[in-house]
Image (cartoon, rainbow, N blue to C red):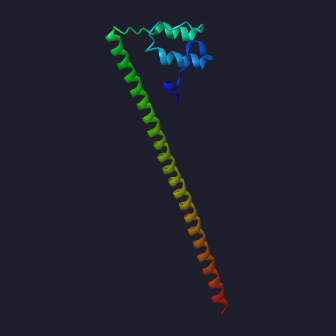
Amino acid sequence: MIDLGKFNKSFEELENDEDRWLYLLKNAGSAKEELPKFGDAALDDAVARIRINETDSETKEAQVTCRMSVEEQIGRLAMAFVDGKEEGRAEGRKEERERLAAEIAAKDASIAAKDAENRKLKAQLEAILASKA
């Protein structure tokens, strides 16, 4: 996050692309004079697209509506991301429970089979001991 309120560089103090973009973002809506040429195609294109006329309330209203729409979309995307992460976690917990239940069931079946085999062997041993007696 960048607080544009703390960005106080003048045009002459701009040192890099980040400074130039921050300057443009901070001053685009409040520049009393025309924004300067930056000598960078992307920045100069952005400046050329900015058409704010203090007397044109229709343009300002459209920009506010557009900004609110963009902010609403960003908010919705952020919430979808958070919800998606929680759904993913819940799905992961469900899958882990299912995996553990299957593993326990397999071990129980193995134990039951061994118990049955042990009972069979015990019965055979008792039959052998009973025949010798």
Please state which of residues 119 and 60 is positioned toward the viewer in this rendering.
Answer: 60
Residue found 51% across the figure and 54% down from its top: 97
Location of residue 14 (image quadrant): top right
Location of residue 127 (image quadrant): bottom right
Please state which of residues 118 and 38 is positioned toward the viewer in this rendering.
Answer: 38
Please state which of residues 39 and 119 is positioned toward the viewer in this rendering.
Answer: 39
Please state which of residues 83 and 107 is positioned toward the viewer in this rendering.
Answer: 83
Residue found 49% across the figure and 19% down from its top: 26
Task: Spot the residue most to the right.
Answer: 132
Residue found 55% across the figure and 15% down from its top: 10
2 lies left or right of 71: right
Figure check: 15 above or below 77: above
Residue found 50% across the figure and 27% down from its top: 3
Figure check: 23 above or below 71: above
Task: Spot the residue most to the bottom.
Answer: 133
Residue 114 in the image: x percent, y percent? 61, 70
Residue 119 in the image: x percent, y percent? 59, 77
Residue 25 in the image: x percent, y percent? 49, 18
Residue 130 in the image: x percent, y percent? 63, 89
Q: Quadrant of the C terminus?
A: bottom right
